[in-house]
Image: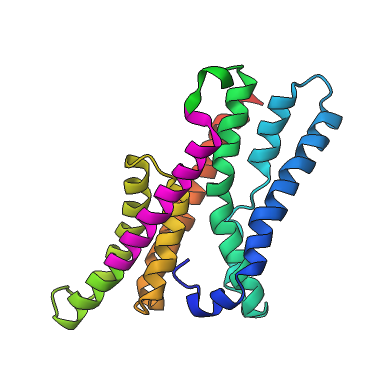
Amino acid sequence: AARVDVRRLRADARVPMRLLLIGLPLSVAVGVGLALAMFADLDVWVCAVIAAAVAPTDAALGAPLMADRRIPGRIRRELNVESGLNDGLVTPIVTFAIAGAVAEVGARPDLSPGIALADLAIGLVAGVALGLAGGLLLRLARRRSWAASGTEPLAVLALALLSYAAAVELGGNGFVAAFVGGLAFGATREATADAIELASQAGELLAIAVWFVFGAIAVPVL
């Protein structure tokens, strides 16, 4: 997210919004229909869980695409934003569908659309606040030589983790906070390639670790 040119993104904002607000819900709806057709014995709520879980694209798997200079910058920018925010937007849908699958919707007032919007709003505010504050503080530290050379990448990685953790602690959406925090940090014009590289590599390493653990659990079960 920190690599996104926010000024150019404002001119292209309509396409990511269409992808997120039209394309993503349509993908979930089509997924529900396909799940009902493929698994006729499943409840519609379970089919909704499947559809909502597989609808968002995986930002980690799509990272090489975002770095491929052969692809036009506008397309990479729009797909970057879509893949960074779709997890956060679909999380309330997944939670609501799971609650429906276990027949607890009536007993769970915390799963209302209003609460879901509040969840996203808290993540948005937390991400913007921490991203801007982190970028400005790093700029100040560089100007006054308060930080040792080579420590800025660690600060950027810590800022990403802090954005996620702070939003979750406040009852908001950590996925949205982390991505929007990166956008806000990049908007300070302090997001150098060297500063972001460690966070990118750490994300790839964590993704590999997650898939390794998933495989270690899934293979014996299957």
Q: Main secondary structure of the magenta part?
A: helix
- Point 63% across, 64% down: residue: 16
Q: Is residue 190 left or right of residue 85?
A: left
Q: Is residue 46 left or right of residue 183?
A: right
| Residue 157 is one of the magenta-drawn residues | no
- Point 59% across, 78% down: residue: 11
Toward the bottom, the furthest residue is: 143
- In percent of width and height, residue 222 lies at 67, 26
- Point 40% across, 43% down: residue: 172
**Quadrant of residue 39 in the image?**
top right
Return the residue nearer the eye: 153 or 48.
48
Against 188, is 117 above or below?
A: above
The answer, for residue 165, to whether it is visible in the render is yes
Toward the front, the furthest residue is: 114
Against 215, is 24 above or below?
A: below
Residue range of the region highlighted in magenta in the rendering: 110-133
Q: Is residue 34 left or right of residue 3?
A: right
Return the residue nearer the eye: 13 or 41.
13
| Residue 124 is one of the magenta-drawn residues | yes
The answer, for residue 215, to whether it is visible in the render is no
Q: How is the image coloured?
A: rainbow
- Number of numbered tags placed on the structure image: 0
- In percent of width and height, residue 160 lies at 36, 57
- Point 47% across, 50% down: residue: 175
- In percent of width and height, residue 12 lies at 62, 74
**Quadrant of residue 185 in the image?**
bottom left
Against 84, is 64 above or below?
A: below
Return the residue nearer the eye: 183 or 118.
118
